[in-house]
Amino acid sequence: MKAGHGEPVIKAGRGAAPGASRAAAVPFLLRWSVLTAAVVCWELAARARGSVYFPPPLRIARHARDLWFSGPAGHLFLTSAGAGTILPSLGRMAAGFALAGVAGIALGIAVGRSRRAYALCNPVLQFARAVPPPALVPVFVVVFDFGTPMQVASIAFSAVWPVLVNSAEGARATDPLRLQVAAVLRLTAPERLWFLILPSALPRIFAGLRLSLSLSLILMVFSELLPGSDNGIGFTLTDAQTRSDLLTVWSALLLLGALGYLLNTGLLAVERRLVGPRTSAGRTA
């Protein structure tokens, strides 16, 4: 009887894993099937129209590969043109995003833990967040002149506000009961910050970091469109436009979309590793 009762359980356990994998594969297949259908429609429409202003996506991808990704494997398949175009842009964006992230988290936690500081700083934060980031670029041109420092400063200053505001909101949302327990346990201020406030604020911090990442990519391109730039994706986009090299223009747009997707996917992977799945976080909250 025990064997008879246990046998169906073993069969159900064996069948659960394929069912779960199939259920997890359905959203993945649906997502990529929609993208594939969109690319196929674009390809067919472009070939039917035959316009030089609307090239097929396969031709754009082939041109981007020949231009930037046909180098040796030891250089990550980057050509000299690819290294001179992609790496400077990623370096500027990474520097600006890192500065914005560190400053935004530190200042946001400090502001969010003090009611008086939050009440005093909140109007300034909301005003600064509402200013369109490209409008600030001329100010940084005057302060830093053209060049990499101006580009990094404009990226960092414009991208810091989503992180700062979300970090402050996350710090303010820390459960007061947990803070009282921490006081009873006589945890020091660094211990409260590390073990209580930061874990509680992490979901909002990562929400701000995702917004900051997209802003960093936009500001990186915009800063490279300005006079004085001599490399980067934005400079390549402007240079190709002036030469009426539409294939390179489309290739740069395709490259920016791919970079944005890859960077956002990487940040989401880090968030899942540190915060956990959103469903679990929602149940815990």
Image (cartoon, rainbow, N blue to C red):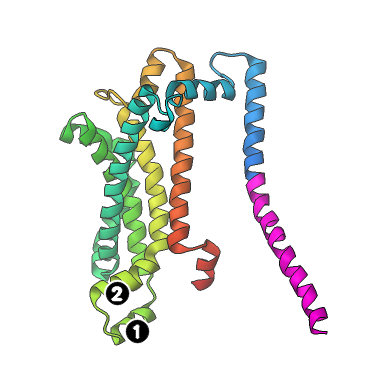
Q: Residues within 10 Å of mark 2 (few under 14, many from 20)?
A: some
Q: Is residue 81 above or below residue 1?
A: above
Q: Quadrant of residue 23?
A: bottom right
> Residue 91: horizontal and vertical position, in percent?
30, 37
For this rendering, which residue is in front, 252 or 83?
83
Position of the N terminus by quadrant:
bottom right
Residue 16 among magenta residues: yes
* Sooner in the amino-acid sequence: mark 1 or mark 2: 1
The residue shown at (30%, 48%) is: 98
Q: Quadrant of residue 105?
A: bottom left
For mark 2, give the secondary structure.
helix
For this rendering, which residue is in front, 170 or 273?
273
Furthest-front residue in this view = 3
Is residue 90 visible to the viewer in this orientation of the structure?
Answer: yes
Q: Residues within 10 Å of mark 1 (few under 14, many from 20)?
A: few
For mark 1, give the secondary structure.
helix
For this rendering, which residue is in front, 57 or 172?
57
- The residue at which mark 1 appears reads as 181
- The residue at which mark 2 appears reads as 192
Which range is magenta?
Answer: 1-29
The residue shown at (32%, 36%) is: 134
Magenta segment, principal secondary structure? helix
Give the Cα separation between the discs numbered 1 and 2.
10 Å
> Residue 53: horizontal and vertical position, in percent?
53, 16
